Amino acid sequence: MSISTSPAVGAPTAHRSRLSRAIETAARGHRSVPVLVVLAIIWAVFYSQSPAYLSFQNLTNLTLQIVTTAILALGVVFVLLVGEIDLSSAVLSGVCAAVAAGLTVNSGLPLPVGIAAAVAAGMAVMFVQAQAVMFGVPSLIVTLGGMVILQGLILVVLPPEFTISVAGTPFATIASAAIPAGTSYALAAVATLAFVAYRLFQYRERLSTGSLASLTTIIVPSALVAAVLFGGVFTLTRQRGLPMPVLIVAVMLLIAWYVTTQTRYGIHLYAVGGDREAAQRAGIPVRRMVLYSFLVLGACAAVAGMVDASRQLGVSVTSGSGPLMLNAIAAAVVGGTSLFGGRGSIWSALLGALVIGSISNGVQLLGLSTEVQYFATGSVLIIAVAVDVVLTRGALLPGRR
């Protein structure tokens, strides 16, 4: 008489499947937790070496240092979410800054005209590159070639002396302006109340559908948001007020958060990155979503370039060069956005930029050699990708390859 052993064989498999799904769900829901732990460790190490590291002045400097990287990383997140990559947006930021500075400083046009022209230029360049990507050319190759072309284009856009000084012009106010402390606290209060209203709306929706809901889902997140906002305002307004670049980053992050989490576009964005073929069969316009992501990156590159040029008080052939591109990609990935597409959050741009910037700031404050910064940044990036592979794809689980 034969005895079937299929249940016994199937049970471990089912258990592994459930365990895999549980780990994947945890990875998606708490991707920012490891980043915050790493950030706390970095701050603790540098603070132990120099108490000035966590002073109000240095925290303000750190915030201003990561602004350009955070804005560019925000655009990179959109491209990574649809499963693509970009290597040209840093150089593009320099080109856009040259366009804006040339129009406002050399041609005497109003600042809003220069800003609009720079954003339009950034989106136009990314539109062309997106067409090649949608045609079937790998985005890595397209944007690598685009980076080389843009390095030549910036020489064309700049005047014969290959530099534009913006010191003493309205263009410089992009980075030098500050919001008074009173207004900054009012903005923090408005943002906190808006978040409370949003969580309350979600709470009522769950109750109306018969789902389990607790007031804890309103109180705890709202308290955390209030602590972060008011703590940030208290820290950053100790000198002249809240720096304008910080407000620019905050507004861009809030808009991106709303678009990616509260609209159909956000649902389609993650669907395309998660499984492009399935998204195509479901009727989602995959090609259009890829195009939109590159357009968002083009706009972010333009803003990042203008903020950086305003901080540096000029544009030159070196604008957008150096480690900016690698730092932006590293920030997005270290912050929790997957290189495989479909997983991540726009907040990863800020968290990753904080991690990368904290290392750089600490190395400079302690007077350490530049190679220490490179070693630390590269190690953090490798570890972040390894964690993404292990947790999100379950690479260490039996039966998962």
Image (spheres, rainbow, N blue to C red):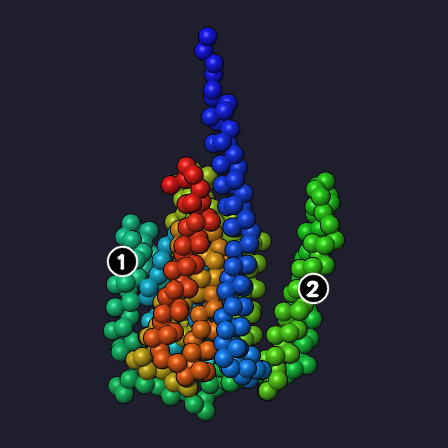
Quadrant placement of the C terminus:
top left
Badge 1 amino acid: Ile
Q: Is residue 266 above or below residue 35?
A: above
The structure residue drawn at horizontal position 39% and vertical position 81%, both measured from the top left corner, is 368
Frontmost residue, 382 versus 319: 382
- Asked whether residue 96 is in view, the answer is no
Q: Can residue 21 be seen in this view?
A: yes
Q: Position of residue 197 (x, y in %)?
A: 70, 59
Name the residue rendered at 28%, 84% in the picture.
162
Q: In this view, does 225 lie to the left or right of 170?
A: right
CA gap between label 2 and label 1 equals 46 Å
Q: Circle 1 sits on which residue? A: 141
Q: Which residue is identified by label 2?
A: 223
> Which of pointers 2 and 1 lies earlier in the amino acid sequence?
1
| Secondary structure type for disc 1 | helix
| Mark 2 vs mark 1: in front | 2
